[in-house]
Structure formats: C-alpha cells, structure tokens
Amino acid sequence: MRFIKTKIEGKLGRLILDNDNKSNSLNLTMLEEFKAAFDNFKQEKCRVVLIEAKPKAKVWCAGLQIDQLPDPSFDPVPYEYALEKILKCVENFPGIVIAMISGSVWGGGCELAFSCDILIGSPSASFSITPAKISAPYNPNQVNRVLQRVGSNIALEMFSTANIMNAKRAIELGILNHLVSENKLKDFTNNLADKILQNAPLTIALIKKQIHELGTRTVEQLTADEQNRALIKQVYNSHDYKEGKKAFLEKRKPNFTGE
C-alpha cells in the first residue's frame, strides 16, 4: 500500500499512517487503502487494531485533504462520503480499535480518532476541530462522535473556536483514556491491547455494538429530518464553503460573508 502500512501479529492488527509529507492527511486513495486494511483485519479475525502514525511524526492525522472535500455540485448531504465510510469501518469492526496518538490531530483527523474505541496519547497529542475555519457543515454522525467524548458545552466551544486542545486538557475531559510519556507510549498501548486480547471477544463485540447503538439512535432520527438536511444543503451551497476551500488552497485568510 502507498499511504498506509499494516502488520498482523497474531490477533493484533496494526495500521500505520504513512503520508508524512502531507501531515498524514487523508486522500481518496489512502481511504481506499484504509478500508481494504480493515476488511483484511476482519477476514484475519483480528480482535484488536492499533492505529498509529510513524515514530516522531509531528501530525498524527490532519484530516481529509481540503481539495478532496465534496463539491456543492454533487450530493450536498454526503452521509456516505469517503471519510464517513472508513469511520464506519472502525465503528463497525467487531474488535476494539485503539488510537495511539503522538502529535497533533486536525479536522477530520479528530473524526478518525473519535471513531476509535480507546484513545491513548502522549504529551505531544493535541486536537482541533476545524470546520468553522472553512465554513464546512458537519452531518449528525460527525457531531455525535464529538458528543460521545465531551458534553455539549465543550463540543460547541471546540466547533466554534477551532482552538487547539492540548493533551492535558484532553485527558481532563475524557477525550484521552490515558496520557502516557512519549518513551512509554508504545509499551503501554501494547500492554493494554494484550489485556483486551485475553478477554472474551464475543462479549466485547456485543457490548461495543450496544454502546454504539445507544449512542447513535437519536442521530439516525436526526439524519432523516428534512429541515436538518435542508440546513446542511444551505451550507454546502454557500459562498462561504467555496471561499473556505479556495482560501485554504491559496494559503490566505478566508473572507466569510455569511452567505
């Protein structure tokens, strides 16, 4: 594979993000590789999967490349857009998926991290949710992944400010399960994975499924709401959405008009 590397060690799968020169941003080819990797992990009956960046990477994942976001000329309510498909791969995987995070996490990278079952970070980990910087909408599935980690007040602050949250704050809020020093991060994560591998896989798979269903049932109702879909269409068809993408690619500050 070109943008990710995978390893299988017994019933443990490893997925290493390998697109450092683009800050591990997710292009469409990388997303297809990601899906194929999870299909293989499932076929090989892996019970735990670790998602990590290469050692010393400054960015764990910078999210979906801006030039590959959906255009308004296509379906403006992309509940099944490319990134969403790999997030569903993680959430629907019967085993436990652990994000081992060293470095910053941006935009859709937060979605990837938050779709994982357990997050373990080093002091260099940080999080920033950035759709307001380019006037991009989030569908209810995306918003709900944040709400599963933090309360509504914290979620609104993260979305509206796009501020960077450091690892200390992330552990205080429960975004990270554990905060571990850089030199102990890999050993700690491996030990946690080993403990999970020792426990009953059918029970773990069942409870994981139940937790996701309990957390998303209202999202499914919201997804079908026509008013909500109309609001998302309004954002996708706006001047600001086009301007946000264009400004990012031109490396300038966007000029948002609210239109």
Image (spheres, helix red, strand yellow):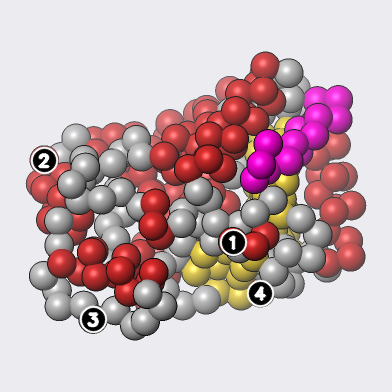
Q: Secondary structure at mark 3?
A: loop
On-image quarter of the N terminus: top right
Question: Is residue 95 located in the magenta-colored stretch of the structure?
Answer: no
Question: Is residue 5 located in the magenta-colored stretch of the structure?
Answer: yes
Earlier residue among tags 1 and 3: 1
Residue 231 percent across, percent down from the top left: 14, 53
Quarter where residue 55 is shown: bottom right
Residue linked to disc 4: 168
The answer to whether the residue labelled 3 contacts the one labelled 4, judged by CB atoms less than 8 Å apart, is no
Residue 258 percent across, percent down from the top left: 14, 74
**Residue at 19% over, 35% down:** 224
Tell me the distance, in whole angstroms, between the alpha carbons under discs 1 and 3.
25 Å
Label drawn at residue 226: 2
Q: Is residue 3 above or below residue 224?
A: below
The amino acid type of the residue labelled 4 equals Lys
**Residue at 69% over, 69% down:** 58
Tell me the distance, in whole angstroms, between the alpha carbons under discs 2 and 3.
30 Å
Tell me the distance, in whole angstroms, between the alpha carbons under discs 4 and 1.
26 Å
Q: Is residue 1 left or right of residue 87?
A: right
On-image quarter of the C terminus: bottom left
Label drawn at residue 258: none
Tell me the distance, in whole angstroms, between the alpha carbons under discs 2 and 4.
40 Å
The amino acid type of the residue labelled 2 equals Glu
Tell me the distance, in whole angstroms, between the alpha carbons under discs 3 and 4.
33 Å
Label drawn at residue 255: 3
How many neighbours does mark 4 have within 10 angstroms: few (below 14), some (14-19), or many (20 or more)? some
Span shown in magenta: 1-14
Earlier residue among tags 2 and 3: 2
The answer to whether the residue labelled 1 contacts the one labelled 3, judged by CB atoms less than 8 Å apart, is no
The amino acid type of the residue labelled 1 equals Lys
**Residue at 83% over, 68% down:** 181
The residue nearer to you, when weighing 45 against 249, is 249
